[in-house]
Image: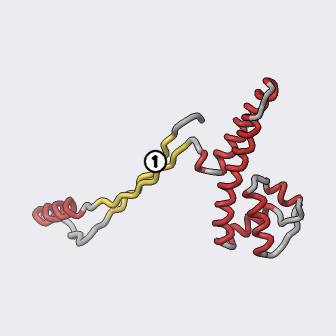
């Protein structure tokens, strides 16, 4: 378990460097650095650290993929190849959860503003002719569409 500590740029840099090299937070805390909880708090409390941690996540996932691919490429044993296949699949799954770059899902957010002014103008004119209710002066409508497209294997 890591030691609790106040924010320290030197310690923060060590954490980021280890994580970017593919070490887990469990590995990092064994080196006497702050706990997982402290790291998560720092990510929220110190936006610059949070942004750098996001970059470290990208580096970490790349390092993990490269490590597994290197083991696969240098494998000469059929039994070991089967184990490496399982390792590759489990590593790929894990990485797809922490780095959207490797995710099988594509998230698409669309924001569209629709001008309903002309339709409202016609409705207001019709209401005036019919002599009903108060007349609306102005209206605006924002529609936000969210879609998640899935691709690849699940």
Q: Secondary structure at mark 1?
A: strand
Residue 120 percent across, percent down from the top left: 21, 62
Q: Does 127 sit left or right of 8 as displayed?
A: left
Residue 118 percent across, percent down from the top left: 19, 62
Identify the image quadrant of residue 136: bottom left
| On screen, residue 46 above or below 126 | below
| On screen, residue 109 above or below 17 | above
Identify the image quadrant of residue 54: bottom right
Q: Residue furthest top?
A: 78
Q: Which residue is mark 1?
A: 147
The answer to which of 60 and 154 lies nearer the viewer is 60
- The colour style of the image is secondary structure
| On screen, residue 63 above or below 84 | below
The answer to which of 50 and 129 lies nearer the viewer is 50
Rendered residue at 80%/70% (across/down) = 11
Name the quadrant of the C terminus: top right
Q: Residue furthest left?
A: 129
Mark 1, residues whose alpha carbon is within 10 Å: few (<14), some, or many (≥20)? few
Residue 100 percent across, percent down from the top left: 59, 50
Rendered residue at 66%/65% (across/down) = 52
Name the quadrant of the N terminus: bottom right
Rendered residue at 75%/58% (across/down) = 19
Rendered residue at 31%/66% (across/down) = 140
Residue 20 percent across, percent down from the top left: 72, 57
């Amino acid at each position: 378990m890591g030691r609790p500590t106040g924010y320290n740029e030197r310690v923060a840099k060590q954490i980021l460097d280890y994580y970017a090299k593919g070490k887990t937070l469990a590995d990092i805390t064994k080196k006497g650095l702050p706990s997982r909880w402290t790291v998560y708090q720092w990510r929220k409390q110190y936006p610059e650290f949070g942004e750098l941690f996001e970059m470290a996540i990208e580096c970490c996932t790349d390092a993990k993929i490269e490590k597994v691919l290197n083991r696969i490429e240098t494998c000469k044993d059929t039994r070991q190849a089967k184990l490496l296949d399982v390792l590759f699949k489990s590593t790929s799954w894990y990485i797809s959860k922490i780095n959207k770059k490797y995710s099988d899902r594509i998230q698409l957010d669309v924001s569209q503003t629709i001008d309903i002014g002309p339709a409202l103008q016609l409705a207001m004119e019709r209401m005036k002719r019919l002599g009903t209710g108060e007349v609306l002066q102005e209206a605006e409508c924002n529609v936000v569409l969210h879609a998640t497209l899935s691709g690849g294997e699940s």
